[in-house]
Image (cartoon, rainbow, N blue to C red):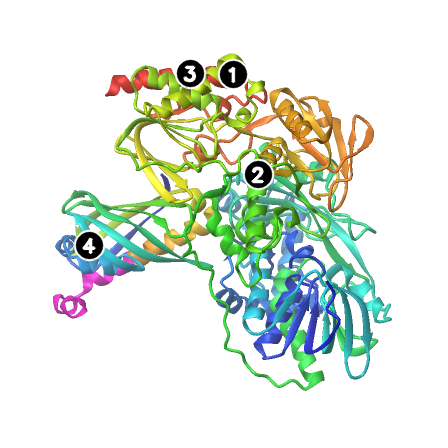
Amino acid sequence: MKRLLEDEILVDAPRDRLWELVDDLPAIQRILPGCEELEALAPNRYRAVMRTKIQFITLRVQGTAELADLHPPDHVRLAISGRPIGLIGAFIVSVPIDVTEVDGRTRGVYAIDLELTGRLAAFGAPILRATVKAQVREMMENLRRELLREPDDVQEATP
Amino acid sequence: MSRRRLERVQAVVIGGGVIGCAVLRELTRRGIDAVLLEAEPSIGEGTSKANSAIVHTGFDAHPGTTEAEMLRRAALLWPEVIEELSVPFLQVGALMLAGDQQEAIRLRDEVASNAARLGVETNLLDRDELRRVAPYVTPRATAALSIPGESVIDPFWLTRRYAEAGIVAGGRVLTDAEVVRLEVTAEQVTLHTDGAGSLAADQVFNCAGLWADDLAALAGEQSFSLRPRRGQFLVSEETFGVEQIILPLPGPMGKGMLVTPIIFGGLLLGPTADDSPDKQDRSVNAEGRRRILAACTAMVPMVEDMVPIRQFTGLRAVSSTGDYILRPSTSGDRLYHVTGIRSTGISASPAIAERVVDEAATLRGWQRRASSARVAEPAFEEAAGELICVCRSVSRGELVGAARQPVGAVTVDAAKRACGVTFGDCQGNLCTVAVAETIAAETSRTADGVLKHRAGSWLLAPGPPAEIRGLRRHRPPAVPGAMDLVVVGGGLAGAGAALAARAIDTRVLIIERRQRWGGALGNRPALMTDEEQYALAALENEIANDTIAGWLEATATGLVPAGGGWSVQVQTADGGLEVTARAVLVATGGYVEPREHLPIDGPRGSGVVTSDFVEAALDAGWLPGRRLMVVGHGRTAELSTGRLRDAGLIVNQVDTADPAVIAAIRGDRRLEAVLVNGAWVDADTLVLAHRLLPAAFLLRALGLVDGRPGIPARSEPNGQTELAGLWVAGSCRKPDVDHRTALADGRLAGTAVAARSEAVR
């Protein structure tokens, strides 16, 4: 897998809040960008349908999302793999996150590793790399929003 | 087919390049009834398909020129264009290098200050700053000017999307419609075409690119002339880490040679700049290749190791006025010239379209009526179907989608520009027949009616009955449980590997993209040794007895490490599936080195193919040509020559492994003659069969080969790669145009992998 970038996120919320989200299916769906459907297949493993805009096209992707390498409260890895509908090829995105708490705030240091096959690999690394980076950053912002969300807000937002 | 009626429209645009298509969009956005006429079978066949694919900021334009004004205006319009048309666009930035102190001063005092006058942001970088942002540039560069706003775009996509936006808003695009007569009066312009009848228009826009002066002459105007400036380019799949546009200080002939990232991956190098009197001359030559490599290596030294997959020539229209010509004709203001746009047509296209339609609207009293029609984003909702293009992983579904767009892909090159098919290492020799057949099915024709690009560039001729067509389709059975070994490729190496592994009780699945086993020689058992024939018969017997699982018409599209073994992604006509295995052995063979990789002087018409193309054509019941020359060696050449002679064709065979015997070719649209061993020989088809390159596309994503063609996969003598459980055999690692070593190499690797599999079981 190729490493695209390393970055970090700092959220004004306690670290325990992150681990509460691990079992919260609607919250995970809100965190995953463009996630249209999310269904639990097994503990920490989900079937997902996502819609992803790659600047000039929008792809619908069927795949799985998994919370792997769970070592609460210090580490989790989000692994998303799937195939775009209508195109040949597949992708695997792996986002390992090291979590620490600093003065009551949560600090997540993360990386993005990407593997592409088939048409996605041929589609052009520059544009796909830019898209994946943007998507993971959007995901981190979604995560920030979820961490800052009051329990009542979560209740209201849950269908 | 002539339509003999005089249709009246508000506006006609002549020329389906990026400018003409942008004007069509602008007209239809304002509710103007507009028709675009294109002389060729497909839009974008001129300068718009052969350029640097850069959206310039205009930092080096001459202040006070129309070009500078248009580039500045376009910079404001681009965000809307990209958003509305969904065009691939990436702001990568550019670095203009200085090689010494004197050049560094020129960067600061001439280029940077000019950019500042034009309002374009630039930043001067010293040597250290340059090394930090672009460590791949030559250490001899002492400074650079960074132009962060420079961007790359897909010019094919842009041209097509402009046209599609015009069609969606009510405009029409008529192809094969060359304007042959033009009458301009105070009331209208009457146009007579060769192919689309006659039209009368309130306003005509002359966007005929290099031929705009010829078109003006049809109206009796001689006020300007255009001459072509030939620019040759090289394409590399390997990027060498280059992420920005790298360019030298400009010279009198323009910006000089650039190293440019291609938005869909790879690098574009060039262009040369040579004035030429011939508007048809899109030939390439070894001298151009040498000059490009020398100039680009001076900026990015690693480029020296490049193996180009393609060389092409674009013709830029240089006007006698030295600037854009955007004005009414001297023959009457109902004809409006939009020409002389030398090399910044893409960059300035939205502003040019806006300007000329504004002025025409004033002249004609058109009221501004905004159209709300919006071109839909391309969707990939169709089933992918089987893999057509092995190099670029393009599916039949994607190709069908390209053919069904508002500006449908009706030629092979149009399909290439729409979805990337035929764009990869083999340059279409493996897949063009399937592409032509798919286009034919979508356009109610037969494949012999599908052209490569322009009129006359035929690809296939009617032939004997298909040798393969009509056989039972092999459907993959249900996905089995985890296998011990998946062999990818059912040629001699794959057969040898599967049999050897099976012999030591290994559960083997072998998959093959063709409809038959045996690889390149599978169609001609007479060329095989007794041992090879026996091995193939044994493989078919094992498959028939279910002791080896075998899938035909199944293509591996990806290998992913999974659970200590491998997941093999496989594509069939019915869709994608995955098989897991302890080990994978890649025996995907090779492809014959195409002309595009070679320094053969001459144009780029159809009819220059490899033996891979010949096999695909004959398999499907088509002839690849009528007067053929086969240049090659070993059993690959024997195979093509033999099958072509069996089809009743006269074949001139040159037995050599050295393609340098071909000095040049002739024929703009279809091959006419080959200069071989110093003499011109008439031929409409040149078949290369001289050298095999490894078809190791699957291994690129894994880093076992880089983006350069012809690089064999790294492996131990027994085929083991540095990745656990991944093996290679045959031409993937030992390309052999004679295929003599394939079976033995497969056996060696199959035995080794099975022994290893036993050990870990």
Residue B601 in the image, given as x and y percentages of width and height: 74, 37
Q: Secondary structure at mark 3?
A: helix
Q: Secondary structure at mark 4?
A: strand
Residue at the spot 33% in from the left edge and 56% down from the top edge: A137
Kind of residue sitting beneath label 1: Thr
- In the displayed structure, B14 sits above or below B54; it is below
Kindly indicate whether the residues beneath marks 1 and 4 are on one polypeptide chain: no
Q: CA distance from mark 4 to mark 3?
A: 57 Å
> Residues in magenta?
A140-159
Chain under disc 2: B
Chain under disc 1: B
Residue B750 in the image, given as x and y percentages of width and height: 38, 18
Q: CA distance from mark 1 to mark 2?
A: 28 Å
Q: In the drawing, does residue A10 fall left or right of residue B462?
A: left
Closer to the camera: disc 1 or disc 4?
1
* Numbered tag placed on residue A106 in the rendering: 4
Q: In the drawing, does residue B758 fall left or right of residue B229?
A: left
**Which residue in the structure is indicated by mark 1?**
B741
Could you classify mark 2 by the number of other residues whose Cα lies within 10 Å: few (under 14), some (14-19), or many (20 or more)? many
Q: Is residue A143 magenta?
A: yes
Say whether disc 2 or disc 3 marks the residue closer to the N-terminus.
2
Q: Secondary structure at mark 2?
A: loop
Residue at the spot 51% in from the left edge and 57% down from the top edge: B88
Name the foreground residue: B139 vs A128: A128
